[in-house]
Structures are given as C-alpha cells and as structure tokens.
Amino acid sequence: MNYLDYIIIIVYLLAFLAMGFFFKENKTSGDYFLGGKSMGWFPLSLSTMATQLSAISFISAPAFVGLKDGGGMQWLTYEFGVPLAMAFLLIVLLPTLYKSGIVSVYEYLEKRFDSSSRLLISIVFQISRSVATGVMVYAMALILQATIQLDFVVSVLLIGVITMIYSFQGGMKAVIWGDVIQMTILFFGIIICLVYGFSELGGIDNFLTHVDPDRVKAVDFSKWGFNNADGNDEFGFWPMVLGGFFLYASYYGTDQTQSQRLLSSKDMPSLKKLLLANGLLRFPFTLTYCIMGLVLGTLLMQDSSYQELIDTVYTSNFSSLEGKKADLMVPVFIIKYLPNGVIGILIVAIMSAAMSSLSSTVNSLSAVTMEDIVKRFKPNMQDKQYISYSRYLSIFWGLVCLFFAFFAGNIEGTVIEVINKISSVFYGPILAVFILAIATKKTHAFGANVGIIAGVLFNMYLWLYVPQIFWFWWNALGCLVTIIVVIGVSYIVKAKAKEGLEVVYNPSRKELAILVVYFGIIVTISTLLPSILS
C-alpha cells in the first residue's frame, strides 16, 4: 500500500462520519428506527442484501468455492429457498406485521399471545446477534492485520467507532444509506477482482481450460441430508430448498435485523417491490462472487507464488486458527495482484463488509432493547427522551459487539459454524409461532411457549444426538414440531386466546408468479452450470 490507498481509506471513513451528521434529525421512534417510513424499495433492498451478504460474501464464500475442501459452486444452493421464502412472506406474514405499525417485530407476539413469548425471543436475539457480529468484526480486523499490517486493535476501533458514530447520529436512515454505499463498493470490488483474475489467468478461455471440474457442479439431487454423520451428505437439493425456505422465511420475517428494514418501507407497494427485488437480485450477486471464487482458486493452482504467500501470511498470523487459511485467498490476491489505488478501494470493500453488518446489528439491537424492555418500564416517554435513550443504547450495543470482537480469538475457529447452527435451532420454532399467531385464532400463549420450548429442545436433540441429519433440516423440522405442539397444547389446555391485531392477507399474484418462475430459472441455471463452464 502507498499514500494513495491510505487517502482513499481516510476519505471513505470521513464520508461516513459526515453522513451520520447529515441524517441526525430524528424526532420520533419511527424516525430513528424505521427511517420515518419514508424509504423507497431500492435502497431498502440493497440494505437488506448488504446485511445478509456483506462479510461472508466477499471473503469466506469465494474461499469456499475456490479453495476449501469439499467446496465449489454448491454454495449457490444456499439461494434456492430465497424466492420461495419471499413469496411466502409477501402473502402470509409481512402484510400483517407492516400494518400493525410495530417497531420491534417481537411486539406482535405480545399483542397476540403475551409478554413472555416476546421477551424470550427478544433476549435470545440480542445475545446471539451481538456475539455473531463481534466475531465477524474480529475476523475482518484479523484479515486487515494479516494483509496490510494494520494493527488489530486499530482495525477493530476504526470499524467499530466510525460505525457507532454514524449509527448514533443518523439512526436507520444513516444505516440504510450507508448500506447502499457499502453494497455498491462491495459489488464494485468483486467485479475488479474478477477482471484482474481473468487477466492474470490469460483470459476466459484459459480459465475454462484449467478450472477444477469438481468445483463447478452446483446441484446434487442424490443427497438428502439424512446421512450426514461424516459431513458428506450436505448441500443436497431438497434440504437446501426446504430447509432454506424455512430459514429465510424466519430470517427475513422474524429476525429484527432484516424485518426492521421491511417495516421501514413507505407503503405496501414499496414493501412488495422490496421483497420481489430481494428475491430476484440475490442470486445474480451470489453467482458473481462464486465465479470470482472459481477464478481466484484456478489462479492459485496456476501460480505457486500465490499459494506460497497465503502460506506465509497464514503461518505468521493464523496458525492457531483452524480453517482460516482458505479465507486469505481474496485479501492476499488484493495485495499481490492489484495496483495501488485499486488496493485502497478493495480494502475499503472489506471494511464496508464489516461496517454494514455492525451498523445493522447496532440499530436493530437498540430498537429491540428499547421497544421490548425499556418501554415496559417507561411507557410514557416523550419523543426527545426516547431518541436520547435509543442513541445511548446504540453505543452500548456497539461496545458489546466490540467486546466480543476483542475476546473472540480463543473460539473463532469454530464459532461461526456454531452460531449458524444455533440460529437454525431457533429459526424454525420462532417462525412457527409467528405463523400460528397470524393464521390461527384458538392458539394461546401457554401453547405458544410450550411449543417454542419443544421445538428448540427437539432441534438441540438433533444437534447433540442425531448427527446424521444435516443442520439445514432443523429449520423445517423445528417449525413443524412447534406447530404440532402449539396446536395440540392449545386444544388440550383450555385458555383464553387474544385476538391480536388485524390479520392482513396480500394475494400479490403477479409477484408470486414471478418468484416461483424465478426459482425454476435459478435451479435450471445452477444445474446446467457444468455444461456452461465446460
């Protein structure tokens, strides 16, 4: 790196500080946490994708595709459940949640059941999300330290403090527009890596000649995920479609980091466009960074000095962290092959990946804590006091995430996989409770609580004692078990059920048809990929 790269990084960080000041006018909870419900579908769709795809899309996913053992283009199957989940949310879940006017999505459970259901899920979200985000910041800071020799503490503080300042000042508007900028930089960075990767390989023809054919196959209809004790029955078509459907329906519909953006839509037509855009745009973006992974992995096999540099960086910085070697593929490529100036842009892309996830988490955690806990004890707060408390909570949660970032070193080697599994333990049961809250009238709070506990315990049993079942299935199985238990307990134990809020169904036949057809298209493209790249 030279002075030009550092200038680019400094300008980027200063711009985000200025953006927080620009959006500092927030007068109500709707302003601070929902952007005043004035946001259009396009920035919200980019913000939603940035939160989900940021750090993992730029570093770990290409490494999985191009370098990791057992990897390859099967990463694309993670996207199969997205269009179907968006169609489900568009029809069943989100119209009711949007019309309710809530800020914390868990508030709906109290209105339909009682406060215990709301608080239980809210607290689980706050703990798991802050830990996961802290580990993500840690991983990004460690990569910056290893590749550009930026001190680990300085990296964490740069990412954390800048993000906290603009989130503190600007609330959801600053977070959303920050995500738009960061998503643009991230995509631009992927395109740069693709272009330079093809150039270093000597063109597309040479890439097609030398690409590993075993890494090109994306869809495997023979794997069902029920014989996965040795880890060789993953990424089958059906577990990725069905398990992915329940995972993404829960993630986008009931996880505050995502649902808060959907609830920020300015009207129902914007919400429809947002869900449609998210269902359509994710796959092309994922396909692009997966191809980048194939290109860089092929280059690594052709250029021994590339592999040697990765080995050197890994030995110097990551030797105690199992599984991190492959994740150095993209950052080492940036330092080795790209010119100054472009390096600065790509380092900014890495920072953007971390800052996008952190800002979204901080704002969502602040919203949930404020709405689900603080307002319970101070229900009649004035707007000015509400905004003040919310801002200080964003600082608090930012510090909590940074705390986990500083102390994640001893567990980072396995914690990302563990956190993904923990999410799948809870996502199915949580989705089930929301579905029953909206779709049924006789289920009650006691049945809901018993069902949540039963569904979670069932998934934990699968995790501990049935390793044959691929964890993606937990999302579907936990949801089905919870539904059965809630309905059964509500039928056996007689208790008064709240009516809750008005249920709103949205036919959206046009959007539904587009998403279902698109599902068929992406499966077809993924299936034909070996022929296309041969």
Image (spheres, rainbow, N blue to C red):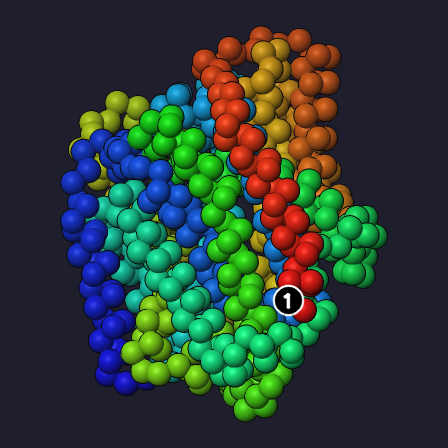
The image quadrant where one finds the N terminus is bottom left
Q: In percent of the image, x 63 and y 33: which residue is there?
A: 429
Label 1 sits on residue:
533
- The one nearer the camera, 478 or 205, is 205
Residue 282 position within the rendered picture, expressed as x and y whole percent measured from the top left? 50, 49
**Vertical placement of 95 versus 181: above or below?**
above
Q: Check disc 1 and give the amino acid type.
A: Leu
Residue 57, x across and y down, in percent: 50, 60
Badge 1 crowding class, 10 Å Cα cut-off, few under 14, some 14 to 19, many 20 or more, is some
* Above/below status of 447 relative to 187: above
Pinpoint residue 123: horizontal percent, then vertical percent: 49, 39
Q: Left or right? Give the position of 76 relative to 387.
A: right
Question: Looking at the image, how many numbered discs can be counted on the residues?
Answer: 1
**Residue 153 picture location, percent across and down:** 36, 72
Residue 209 visible somewhere in the drawing: yes
**Is 352 above or below relative to 522?**
below
Q: Residue at x 16, y 51 (%)?
A: 21
**Residue 144 in which image quadrant:** bottom left
Front-most of residues 256 and 156: 256
For the question of whether residue 138 can be seen, the reply is no
Can you tell which quarter of the image residue 480 is in?
top right
- Mark 1 lies on a secondary structure that is loop
**The image quarter in which residue 355 lies:** bottom left
Task: Give the residue drawn at x 71%, y 71%.
Answer: 213
Q: Is residue 28 left or right of residue 435?
A: left
